[in-house]
Structures are given as C-alpha cells and as structure tokens.
Image (cartoon, rainbow, N blue to C red):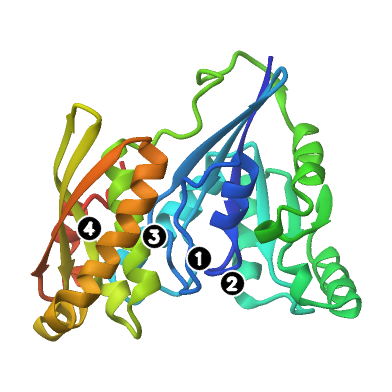
Amino acid sequence: MKSAYISIVGRPNVGKSTLLNAILGEKIAIVSKKPQTTRNRIMGVHTVGDTQFVFLDTPGIHTPRTDLGKYMVDAAKGAIGDADLAILVVEPHGSVGDIEQKILGRIRKCEIPAILVINKTDLSDAKKIGDTIASYAAEFDFSAVVPMSAKNGQGVDILLEEADKHTQEMPWLFPDDMITDQPDRQIAAEVIREKLLRTLDREVPHGTAVVIEEFLEEKNMLRIRANIFCEKESHKGIIIGHKGAALKLVGTKARTDLEEFFGCKVFLDLWVKVKENWRDNPTVVRNFGYRKD
C-alpha cells in the first residue's frame, strides 16, 4: 500500500476544484466562473490499485479584505504545510505573478516537492504555454510540469503518474470506496451556494453563506431546510427575485444536483435572511462553519 497527501494550490479561479472533480470522476467541489468560489479546504480521496491519493483542494490565495478572506487564505497556506506534495495550478499567462511567488515561497519554506500544472491550455497557444513553462522553471525546480485542461479531463492520467512518484509505502488512511470527508450537510450547503454563484451577479454571491438547519432522511427522500444569509436587505430582494423567481431557480438547480449526488428525491426548503456585514465578523464567520479546526 502507498499513499500521499497532496495540496492543490493557486490563485482564485484557475481551476483547482475542476481539477479535483476531474481526478475523482465525481463532483465534490463546487465550481463557478466567479473567483473565490472555494472557501474551505476540501479533501478528495482517489484510490487506484495499491495507491491512495489524498487531495486537498484549497481556497484561492489572494489579498484578503475581510475576516472570511483571511480564513480562506490561512486554510490554503495551512494545507501546504500538511502535504507531502504540492500541485501549483496556474493559467498560461507567460509570466509568474506576485501571488504565485508567495505560494512558491511557502512551498520552499515547507520543503516539499511541487508539480506545476498549467491549466486551460485549450484556451491558449503553444507560445504562451512555452513562455509560462520557461518563466516558472526559472523560479522553482518543479518535479514535473503538466500542461492540461481539467475541464476536458485532458492530462489527468499524466498528473497522477507524476504524483505517484511522491507516494510512500504506508497503510491507507481511508476506506477504498471513500471519496471525501465532507459531511452530507456541508455538501448540500455548498451545492446551494454554487447555484447562488452561478445565478446571481455582482458582489451579492460572495456575501452569501448557506447554513443547513434541517437534514432529515425519510423513506426514499431527503428533506433539507437551509437558510441563505446575505449582508444587506437590498441583497435579500435580489436573491429572492421578482415574485420569488430567482430563489425558485436556485432551488430547482440545487435540487437537481442534490438528487443526483444522494440518489434519491430531495425536498428543498430555502429561506433568505440578512446578517449585516457578516464576512467582517470573526464570530459569525466561525458560526457559519468557517473554523480553522
């Protein structure tokens, strides 16, 4: 038996969660085009043959402006220190950004090997990709460089082959049929939040938090009641929409995904409440589930 803890790190919106989902062949991390979608450290377990990869998907590292942002950055940095290997995900922009420099500094400090993943190559060209490889090679001695398109699943097998070189002989820490340590309640809350991110515009989605108040397993059905918290009364009206249209759309999309994930009918009851400027309140941030422990 072999295993390794692997942190997936990078700036917001480079495709870290998409990569984790592609590796697992199952959607356990929410994705959207909006940055800072992932807020918690999410564990995904991929067991193949005698090898168990334990991946840690992390929030995008950025310059935080709120207590929630500070929590997210701390979670990402902590995941690097806990890992046997880091996967740095970047886009083929040619040069190394300031945020990536900080991430590489953290990797050096933790003295762990790293693989460079250049994602979204399907949206780029050979010159940009080549320039990106050269720029990062000059900054850090990566054990491997893997150009890929996580969205299309291209390059996943190559990445796993490279990651396997960093596994160690040790007993598996998780059952071979386990894919994540996320509780069902957290998965439900994240699915709902993803639909908010995909449905709403402007800053409103980033000011939302979803708290599951009721999660009841009945015969062939799940009954879920959730509170959606936003920061302003005006945001509440936007989330609900004209005659409840926006909230109904969020609920319909979330219920479809939840039924597919849990394999049963789902009764979803959504409520919208206001908690003024909650992202700047450390106590509320913790109460909403964003805890360092």
Q: Quick one: label 3 or label 4, which is nearer the N terminus?
A: 3
Q: Secondary structure at mark 1?
A: loop
Marks 3/2: CA distance? 14 Å
Residue assigned mark 2? 99
Q: Quick one: label 4 or label 2, which is nearer the N terminus?
A: 2
- Labels 3, 4: front one: 4
Residue assigned mark 4? 210
Residue assigned mark 1? 61
Residue assigned mark 3? 72
The residue positioned 19% from the left and 26% from the top of the image is 219
Circles 3 and 4 in contact, beta carbons < 8 Å: no
Q: Which mark is residue 274?
A: none
Residue 231 seen in this snapshot: no
- Residue 81 position, x and y percent, is 54, 44
Specify few, some or many for label 2: CA neighbours under 10 Å numbering under 14, 14-19, or 20 or more.
some
Residue 111 seen in this snapshot: yes
Specify few, some or many for label 3: CA neighbours under 10 Å numbering under 14, 14-19, or 20 or more.
many
Say what amino acid the circle numbered 3 marks: Met
Circles 3 and 1 in contact, beta carbons < 8 Å: no
Q: In terms of depth relative to the viewer, which is nearer, 154 or 92?
A: 154
